[in-house]
Amino acid sequence: MSKVRTRFAPSPTGRMHVGNLRTALYTYLIAKHEGGDFILRIEDTDQERFVEGALDIIYHTLKETGLVHDEGPDKDGGVGPYVQSERNAQGIYLKYAKQLIEQGDAYYCFCDKERLESLKSKVSDEDGGTEIVVYDKHCLHLSKEEVERRLAAGEPYVIRQNVPTEGKAGFDDVLYGHVEVDCSTLDDNVLIKADGLPTYNFANVIDDHTMGITHVMRGTEYLSSAPKYNLLYEAFGWQPPMYVHLPPVMREDFRRDKMTKEIIPDENGNPVTIVRKLSKRYGDPTFEDLLEQGYLRDAIINFIALLGWSPKGEREFFTLSELEEIFDLEGINKSPALFDMNKLTWFNAEYVRRLSAEEYEKIATPWLQKALGEGKFDLKRLCELLQPRTEVFNQLPEMVDFLAEMPSFDKELYTHKKMKTNPEVALDALTRILPVLEKQEDWSEAALHDTVMAAIQEFGMKNGQMLWPLRIAISGKANTPGGAFEIAYLLGKEETLKRLNHSIEELKA
């Protein structure tokens, strides 16, 4: 068997969505598992969708994910250029298109927009009706002299594939087996557009062959086009690659208006839950979005790897190098995968727990400084308290904002059945502990613990009757990273006493 060569061929249209990243990941893993090459190719023939700066995003995403390409626009492996517009400028696609014309497997088409419109037929009444154009091979029958005359006159043209009207066209897929269709159901699709650029359907065939690609991985939306691809391979006498058509990544959502994206309720006014394909149009997160939200790279990659692939055994957590070793095509599922943000968050929380204290502090510090500023608190101690409680790093500012500024809160927050406390009990507890803390010189956590616990015993109170009100009084929150002693230490003596006095006055009012 020849050396495995795979390609990831994104279009420069913006940030990389999760489905596209999964394709890149699987394509990379196939190559690395077999000791092969992973090639980056930029498919920019659709100039209308081109987004400025998107190429930089592609490079950055691959770097961030660790999916290092062996060949690409920045790493010439001898089969470049690796950008389709550059390949087109060299006349690569036109050369092969003209070869097909000479063989009778393609032809020039001069039909204008008006004539093509006349060929439209309705295939569906849903949403106002879906119309398609099935070309009638009109220009196939033009004489060679007529074609040359029109070309010489500078008439606009496209080059179409001459699909047989009889027989079968098919291909083999790793997941779906042998897929076959009647040639009579296939259209003569355009190979070279009027602007001189190749269509995706044509360019990817030429590029995959000339770059020696052995395995092609793409979405199931290309299943219907694959028979036409193989007709092109047959016309050139080339060996087609191994195809792996991946089922889509789906997500639960509410039924929404296609234009406004607003939720459409049922007849009772309740939202209707549906399962739909991941899409940027609906605001589904891209890889960069997830990083900006504070998800860890390794957690994202691990999670995405399991969106449609099942490893042998019960293990769920893998490094990228471990995935390279164990990934196989047999584990890819035929069913659509479900993108579950809750599952990703759980994954991320597990990865956060596995960080060293130093790693956690390095990642957490910028998030904490957003809420707290610099140099005001013992971030090392704060990170020790936060790490077991962190699911996603963008939660940190809200978890610690009370340290920077005491929030206003309802007195009923002092009420806690289990702790046997309420506003009246709280006022008594806080009034008793205030003078004790005013006299406290050692403001370490250990010293505060010993002093307060001794006072509780002296007062004849339950622990919760003192500790719950104290935490509420100096934080204003029911859920905090750490208890009363930790918070008091972080705030410092002056701020703690200030908040205590304020809370007592509020309880008296």
Image (cartoon, grey):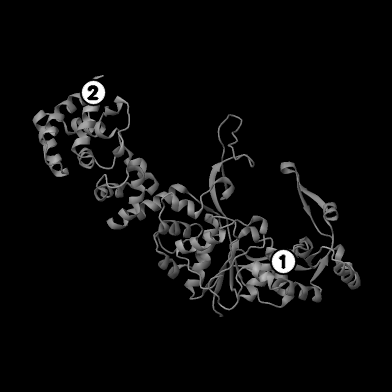
Give the residue type at disc 2.
Glu
Per the model, the C-alpha gap separating discs 2 and 1 is 80 Å
Q: Quadrant of residue 445 in the image?
A: top left
Q: Circle 2 is placed at which residue position?
A: 505
Give percent across and percent down for residue 99: 77, 76
The residue where tag 1 is placed is 228
Give the foreground label among 2 and 1: 2
Judging depth in this view, the residue of 377 and 295 nearest the camera is 377
Q: Residues within 10 Å of mark 2 (few under 14, many from 20)?
A: few
Disc 1 marks a residue whose amino acid type is Lys
Image coords of residue 199 (percent x, y)? 70, 63
Answer whether labels 2 and 1 touch (C-beta < 8 Å). no
Circle nearer the N terminus (2, 1):
1
- Placement of 188 over or under 492, stated as above or below: below
Disc 2 is placed on an element classified as helix
User: Which residue lies at the image location 65% right of the left edge and 60% below the top edge?
Assistant: 222
